[in-house]
Amino acid sequence: MPARTPAPLTVEYVIDVRRAETRYPGGDPEAGIASLHAFSFGAHYDPDNLRFGALIACNEERLAPGAGFDEHPHSHTEIVTWVVEGELTHRDTTGHETLVRPGDVQRLSSAAGVRHVERNDASQPLTFVQMWLAPLGPGGDPAYEIARGLADSSPYALPEAGATLHVRRLRPGQRAAVPDAPRVYVHVVRGTVRLGPHELGPGDAARAAEEKGLELLGVSEAAEVLVWELTE
């Protein structure tokens, strides 16, 4: 009896895909602010979608010229901002005043408490993604940092939250490994990519836990993806 050819192995991934159109709308359209929230936020309370590991918010914000968020408080939160297009003006009560541009990573550790202002003082529309992470421990002093022009090969570590941010920019057919980690959160900024069996477009996100060997594959030109490597 001839030997049977073994069937090819298939890899099954458990990935929770959240589409852009399922995000919770927010902001103040009359004031030129449009927001889309990936997690339970404000009036959109969802007890089953409060956080993913340390990540507690991933907000897409669009500000018209002259629009912005007036001074408001934060505490016990690591706030990371990625500008997609335009220019963000940031001011806080620890004395920092910064212009944040595409490719820059801005981090504000609110610690025991800080207040800040976020505005679009330019003449062009502003789009940015802002991500909030819960720190491993409460308290401490507020801290601020900006990393200019983050490259694909330069992960941005956030040890206060046990997390690392990776930026992946992909051309069609180009592959990039996703870190093997207890949890991984993927947010597509622009373009189209594949993650395992799933095709993801702008604003789509994916959550994976304890997955090994995941890869991103570029589908469209100029795809840009934010990947959070989370230790918890």
Image (cartoon, rainbow, N blue to C red):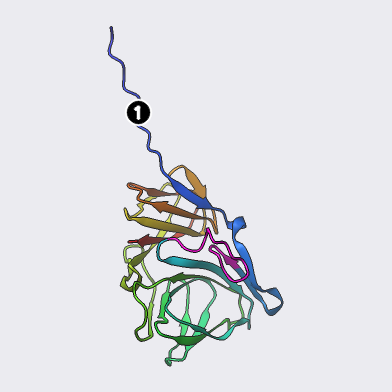
- Residue 109 on image: x %, y %: 40, 80
Q: Nearer the viewer, residue 141 or 200?
A: 141
Extreme residue toward the front, this view: 47
Q: Residue at x 40, y 85 (%)?
A: 112
- Residue 16 on image: x %, y %: 48, 50
* Magenta region: 36-52
Q: Is residue 78 left or right of residue 155?
A: right
Q: Name the quadrant of the N terminus.
A: top left
- Residue 143 on image: x %, y %: 37, 84
- Residue 204 on image: x %, y %: 53, 56
The answer to whether 73 is drawn above or below residue 163 in the figure is below
Q: Name the quadrant of the C terminus.
A: bottom left
Q: Residue at x 43, y 76 (%)?
A: 77
Q: Nearer the viewer, residue 117 or 24?
A: 24
Could you tell me if residue 195 is visible in this image?
no
The answer to whether 218 is drawn above or below residue 123 in the figure is above
Q: Which residue is mark 1?
A: 8
Q: Nearer the viewer, residue 126 or 197?
A: 197
Q: Residue at x 53, y 63 (%)?
A: 39
Quadrant position of residue 95: bottom left
Residue flagged by tag 1: what amino acid is it? Pro
Could you tell me if residue 16 is visible in this image?
yes
Q: Residue at x 68, y 79 (%)?
A: 31
Which SS type dominates the magenta stretch? loop
Q: Secondary structure at mark 1?
A: loop
Q: Nearer the viewer, residue 140 or 173?
A: 140
* Residue 157 covered by magenta stretch: no
The answer to whether 97 is drawn above or below residue 182 in the figure is below
